[in-house]
Image (cartoon, grey):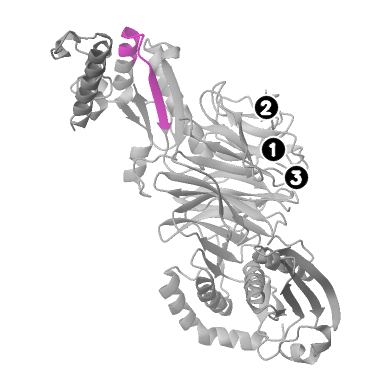
Amino acid sequence: MALRPSTELMELLVKPLAIWLSCKIRSKPLVIAIRLSPQAGKSLVIRTGLLQSMLGLLLLAQASVASAVLTIEIIGAGEHQIPVAIVPFGGDSKLAQTINEVVTGDLQRSGLFRLVDPAGKSPHELAEVSYPDWQMRGADALAIGTVALQTNGRIEARFRLLDVVKQTELAGQSVSANDDQVRAVGHRVADLIYEKLTGDKGVFSTRIAYVNRQGKKFSLMVADSDGYNEQTVLAQNEPIMSPAWSPDGSHLVYVSFETGHAAIYVQSLYTNQRMVLADFRGSNSAPAWSPDGKQLAVVLTRDGSSQIYLIRPDGSGIRRITFSAAIDTEPNFSPDGQSLLFTSDRGGSAQIYSMPVGGGAEQRITFGEGNNFSPRYSPDGKGFVYAHFSNGKFYIAAQDFQNGQVEILTAGGWEKKPSFAPNGKLILFASEARGRGILATVSSDGRVQQHMFTQSGDAREPVWGPHL
Amino acid sequence: MKKLVISIVLVNLLAACASEKPKAPEAAAPVPPPVVTAPAPEAAPAPAPMVEVDSLNDPASILAKRSVYYPFDVSAVQDADKPIVVAHAKYLSEHPDRNVRVEGNADERGSNEYNLALGQRRADGVKQMLVLGGAKASQIETVSYGEEKPKATGHDEASWSQNRRSDIKY
């Protein structure tokens, strides 16, 4: 990073302003990420990306203008940000503007990119690109393209991603979609840029599910990964809990109290058809789909305390797999489908345990003070995230299976129900801000957080869907 | 036929009046069923004297208490609340035609799923005590709302203590 000295100077100059501004706007301290490593005892390393916070504030303003539906705030920035210039596409200017907003918003929220201002230069074709222009601006990569509404009513965007340093083309692609899917085109472009520049698959085109509570009204929602395009799957005056995706993204399974007690339902997102998966006496809850889609783990109280069972997606073949007198709940399948993580209070308070899906050999894997809940495997199966509760606060934490290292990824508050993006780079969770339940994400290294404020009500129980 | 309709309307009116009275809301629910079946001759006299006094409807009775409360992450009925459960057990054993629904709740400290399980364990604990006290298991249904239906919504002990609760509902 050749720019470091001057950046640090800038930070010194900008710091007081940034803090003042952030207090004014967010009324939250400028704590970006607190990492708590066991080796260092309880010492806190506080990282602040001040320039980036300014950037975040600018983006906040931008996001507010872009849509009244959703406000997105970004806190912090990644360690190694790739400087990339996104030139607004040529062609249909209205479509181009939306695509530009989506692409730049996606890339910025990931925390892995620094957007280089293309001001004054607007090449749309390869022949119009002068690489030295972009080298001077410090861009490592450049995206250019055009978008048009075709006669068949479809949007077609053609774009190229260029390596400014090597002066080569990294990718050239055309993306098309129905005319009401302009944001989807933007997410697709952002995914391709993300994948080419980071080596990881992008998750901007994926969807999330969550529950919105407004007074006594509960709605099961599905939205784009950035919180836009929200659609109601189910709305009722009884609680809805614990939505989970089928591995192919075609169905949601969830808990509904519509008959007066907790029962599990499966609903198609294509036909909206729904069926009862489990409705035994007591509580039926905590559904989790196996990676191959052939079975689900659920929690039933039909035989006594909350215990874990396996069940086929059609409701047949129920088989109990935990046999404790305690609470065993929140099962989650490992990516290879062989193991389960779950929450149990068999040791006296809520902790995370693991077991083979076949049953037996249960093992406690979280220790230390406080309680732990809601475990979820990382997509590579090497670790897991969970909600950690201590001293009256919930934190999102991650633990590595191999070395047992625990990382507290968030500053703490009312932070619950984490789930990984399918590429493992972001974690979605339920949080609270300004007295409301909101959706939030944190990068898997704890450096970048974003808060998504939905239009109204409390957002809770979010879960990230699979790649489609 | 017309008479029957009229008397049903009358009963409905009476019931409506009764339920509008703010006092003792918990006791208001069971409208004495015999009234409906007896097609009273002409202007029916007030039906009240026909009904024996049900201790369940007596606001002074311990049976008027229908909730028990718990410390954090505890599901055993506390000593202070045991007489309430014992009294309901006795009532249920003396009234085998009556059924109850025990609804367990939890405060918001914990995951929603853990709290659902905790609320269920609380409700099941009350059921166990009711059965030990003479009620039949078949008279009792248990459900949990976990933290989904909080009575009080603050993030503080004042709210939480109200939400760590099982309700006995007839």
Is A213 displayed left or right of A154 in the figure? left
Q: Earlier in the sequence, mark 3 or mark 2?
A: 2
The answer to whether any part of residue A219 appears in the image is: yes
Asked which quadrant contains residue A336, the reply is top right
Q: Earlier in the sequence, mark 3 or mark 1?
A: 3
In space, the residues marked 1 and 2 are separated at their CA atoms by: 11 Å
In space, the residues marked 3 and 1 are separated at their CA atoms by: 10 Å
The chain under label 1 reads: A
**Which numbered dot is residue A335?**
3
Circle 2: residue type: Ile
The chain under label 3 reads: A
The answer to whether any part of residue A330 appears in the image is: no
Which type of secondary structure does the marked residue at label 1 adopt?
strand
Q: Earlier in the sequence, mark 1 or mark 2?
A: 2
The chain under label 2 reads: A
What residue span does the magenta drawing correspond to?
Answer: B89-104
Asked which quadrant contains residue A285, the reply is top right
Spot occupied by residue A214 in the image (x, y as percentages of width and height): 42, 49
In space, the residues marked 3 and 2 are separated at their CA atoms by: 19 Å
Q: Do the residues marked 3 and 1 share a common chain?
A: yes
Q: Do the residues marked 1 and 2 share a common chain?
A: yes
User: Which residue occupies the foreground of this view, A321 or B138?
Assistant: B138
Label pair 1/2, CB-CB below 8 angstroms: yes
Q: Which residue is mark 1?
A: A340
Which type of secondary structure does the marked residue at label 2 adopt?
loop
Spot occupied by residue A328 in the image (x, y as percentages of width and height): 59, 32
Circle 3: residue type: Pro
Q: Which residue is mark 2?
A: A321
* 10 Å crowding of disc 2: few (<14), some (14-19), many (20+): some
Asked which quadrant contains residue A341, the reply is top right
User: Which residue occupies the foreground of this view, B127 or B16?
Assistant: B16
